[in-house]
């Protein structure tokens, strides 16, 4: 199963991101979507699991603050801000978060922590990144995807 993992799109789905979404079986989004049209667009490509970010206001009240989903034996916990991850993550294999716009892929205490970075408008001089992962039979392999952008 191919999983696209993204966050902090802030109202922009770049063409390079859309190309990756076309091959995804599932999309995980760590929040700060900013527009309902982005949610609609993401749903055109694959089943979508999404959480609400701090910039997702009234229009996003139906989107959950956090979400747990199991895909092919791997259990993901999604939340926008890492500071809001609960202390008890029993049964969780992977934590997906966003907010900082900084790419993170690290294993700590048996948990894989993934922040795909931001693939929306470039902010804070950060790179534009997302992740593609392969999930199968209870295992996950995640890969950083760098999105080319104009230097500004």
Image: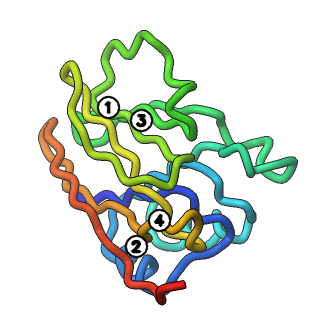
Q: Earlier in the sequence, mark 1 or mark 4?
A: 1
Residue 17 position, x and y percent, is 43, 77
* Disc 4, SS: loop
Count residues near mark 4 (Cα–Cα under 10 Å), then give few for <14, some for 14-19, many for 20+: some
Numbered-mark total: 4
Q: In 3D space, how far apart are the residues under numbered discs 3 and 2 (Cα atoms)?
A: 19 Å
Q: Residue 6, relative to residue 31: is it above or below?
A: below
Residue receiving disc 2: 21
Q: In 3D space, how far apart are the residues under numbered discs 2 and 1 (Cα atoms)?
A: 21 Å
Residue 97 position, x and y percent, is 47, 41
**Lateral position of residue 120 relative to residue 24, left or right:** right
Which residue is more in the foreground, 102 or 57?
Answer: 102
* Disc 1, SS: strand
* Disc 3, SS: strand
Q: In 3D space, how far apart are the residues under numbered discs 3 and 1 (Cα atoms)?
A: 6 Å
Residue receiving disc 4: 126
Q: Residue at x 34, y 12 (%)?
A: 90
**Lateral position of residue 113 relative to residue 152, left or right:** left
Residue receiving disc 3: 69
Please report contact status of discs 3 and 2: CB closer than 8 Å, yes or no: no
Q: Residue at x 46, y 72 (%)?
A: 45
Q: Residue at x 31, y 57 (%)?
A: 3
Count residues near mark 1 (Cα–Cα under 10 Å), then give few for <14, some for 14-19, many for 20+: some
The C terminus - image quarter: bottom right
Please report contact status of discs 3 and 1: CB closer than 8 Å, yes or no: yes
Q: In the drawing, what numbered circle is on residue 75?
A: 1
């Amino acid at each position: 199963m191919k999983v696209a993992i993204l966050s902090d799109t802030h109202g922009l789905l770049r063409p390079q991101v859309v190309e990756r979404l076309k091959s995804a079986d599932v999309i995980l989004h760590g929040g700060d979507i900013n527009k309902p049209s982005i949610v609609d667009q993401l749903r055109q490509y694959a089943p979508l699991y999404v959480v609400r970010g701090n910039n997702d206001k009234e229009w996003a009240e139906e989107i959950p603050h956090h979400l747990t989903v199991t895909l092919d034996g791997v259990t993901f916990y999604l939340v926008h801000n890492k500071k809001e991850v609960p202390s008890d993550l029993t049964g969780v294999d992977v934590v997906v978060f966003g907010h900082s716009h900084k790419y993170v892929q690290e294993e700590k205490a048996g948990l894989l922590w993934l922040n795909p970075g931001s693939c929306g408008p470039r902010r804070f001089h950060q790179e534009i990144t997302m992740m593609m992962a392969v999930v199968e039979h209870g295992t996950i392999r995640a890969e950083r995807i760098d999105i080319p952008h104009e230097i500004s």
